[in-house]
Amino acid sequence: MKRRGRPVLGAIAGLLFGLFLGLDLFILGVVPLDSVLITILVLLGLAGGLALGLLAPFGPKAPTAAEADVTAD
Amino acid sequence: MHRRWLIVGGGVVFLLLASAPVAHAVLSGPCTGQGTFESQGRTYEASTSDKLVLPAKDSVAYTGTIDAAQPEGRSHRGQITLKLPPPLPSIAIADWSDDDTDALSDTGTYDYDLPFIVPRGVTLNLEGEHVDTAGTCTGSVEVEIEGGPFTAPLPTVISFALTIGAGSMAWVAGKAR
């Protein structure tokens, strides 16, 4: 099966998302610097981004070229 | 393909190490130190202070001493750094060095002005070390810079923007090629 998403981009972007989300929470004083939640957020971001890239695409399936021709006719 | 995963895995290990818990209010070695913050009029001892609440800009009248059996002809160097949360870099507050000294103490006044990227109103870790021929001293203490997340709003806004940017990238990764 050909992958249609971008798992590497998803993993890196998810990791950064988790990292910056942790930084936001720290700056807002929600969690302390040594909180394990920050590490968990980074790992969850990595896993979530990777899953997003592997399971893509989401939403309604785009019509194939053949289906588009039939619709046009 | 494997190299990509190696890079991602390396990033995770780095983040886990960078997120390790920090020590609190520790001073080891044959040194003593204290500083009086001009705007607060308060004096803090390096060995006894727990969490300090400090201004972002101030003048500090400091005194530092070291015990040495043979004070002549020593060399020393030292530094004080403020550790910030990853991925922000550490901030160098002060550093000193001398290749030939007999002095067992030093006093003076030091002016500091923290850059805008230092988050306000949260607990950070201030670390210092003095490496001397007579012995090495290391210390760390928790500090909080006066103010809140919107006292100096730029780091907060930048952090929010980076979060939204990274989230958007992750969302794009979930779209069809």
Image (tube, coloured by chain):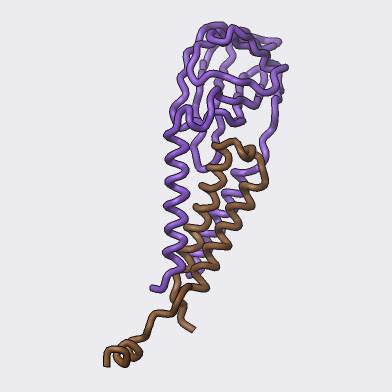
Chain colours: A brown, B purple
Task: Name the quadrant containing residue B65.
Answer: top right
Task: Name the quadrant containing residue B143.
Answer: top right
Residue that appears at 65% across and 25% down: B141
* Residue A1: x %, y % from top left: 49, 84
Taking depth in this image into account, of B65 and B38 the one nearest to the observer is B38
Task: Work out whether residue B20 can be spotted.
Answer: yes
Taking depth in this image into account, of B27 and B57 the one nearest to the observer is B57
Taking depth in this image into account, of B74 and B166 the one nearest to the observer is B166
Would you say A10 lies left or right of A37 here?
left
* Residue A37: x %, y % from top left: 65, 47
Residue that appears at 53% across and 13% down: B100
From what the image shows, is residue B72 above or below residue B30? above
From what the image shows, is residue A29 above or below residue A40? above
Residue at the farthest left position: A73
Q: Quadrant of the C terminus of chain B?
A: bottom left
* Residue B14: x %, y % from top left: 57, 49
Residue that appears at 45% across and 72% down: A5
Task: Name the quadrant containing residue B70.
Answer: top right
Task: Work out whether residue B72 can be spotted.
Answer: no
Residue that appears at 44% across and 76% down: A4
